[in-house]
Amino acid sequence: TESLGQLREVPLTDPVATDLSVARPLVERYIAAARRSVQAARTDAAAAQQQMPDFLGAFTALEKQMASLSEKIEADARQKSEDAAASVRRTRITIAVALGLAAAALVACAIWLARHLSRPMEAAVAMAERMAAGDLRSSEPPMGSDETVRLMQAMAQMQQNISGIVRAVQSHA
């Protein structure tokens, strides 16, 4: 009965707690019947025989109650297992969504960074293409990384120099 008393400290569902409270007096009845039978058997075999129906009745009642308690404990265990599995599924979905959002954010950042880095180079290429087409008057403000800024400044200087050479040739012609 001490073990049954210790179970009160464990968090139990109402059906299990109810069956447990019903089982405790049945255990006590069974133990008392067993003690009476053993005591009688020490002194009088016939008296011990007369105690057997009470002992067997106590045993049968306890056995039925323990079977009921066992079924309820198993049902609770199954429910807890199902609840845990559902919680794991929800956690997996949450992690998958978080990973998907993180991946989308990473892709967006990569696209932004690629555009941020490529725009100044595209401006330098456009300036070079205009110069190659003969437009020596257009200019682009230098922007981007140090190397891109230096490239655009050198191209602007080259544009000014070529423009000066063209003016000099036109004035002497």
Image: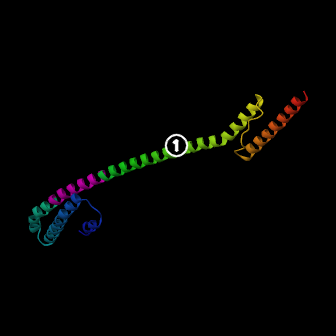
Q: Nearer the viewer, residue 60 or 12?
A: 12
Q: Was residue 166 drawn as part of the magenta stretch in this picture?
A: no
Determine whether, in the image, residue 127 is placed left or right of residue 70: right
Q: Nearer the viewer, residue 16 or 46?
A: 16
Q: Is residue 147 above or below residue 134?
A: below
Residues drawn in magenta:
60-78
Q: Which residue is pictured at 15% across the width and 58% down the height? A: 60
Q: Which residue is pictured at 16% across the width and 69% down the height? A: 32
Quarter of the image holding residue 130? top right
Image spot of residue 19 (x, y percent): 20, 60
Q: Nearer the viewer, residue 61 or 99?
A: 99
Q: Was residue 66 drawn as part of the magenta stretch in this picture?
A: yes
Residue type at mark 1: give it: Ala
Q: Is residue 150 above or below residue 55?
A: above
- Disc 1: which residue: 104
What kind of secondary structure does the magenta stretch mostly adopt? Answer: helix
Image spot of residue 4 (x, y percent): 25, 66
Quarter of the image holding residue 57? bottom left
Q: Which residue is pictured at 88% across the width and 33% down the height? A: 168
Quarter holding the C terminus is top right
Question: At numbered mark 1, what does the secondary structure look like: helix, strand or loop?
Answer: helix
* Protein image colouring: rainbow
For label 1, count other residues whose C-alpha is less than 10 Å away and answer few (under 14), some (14-19) or many (20+).
few
Image spot of residue 40 (x, y percent): 13, 70
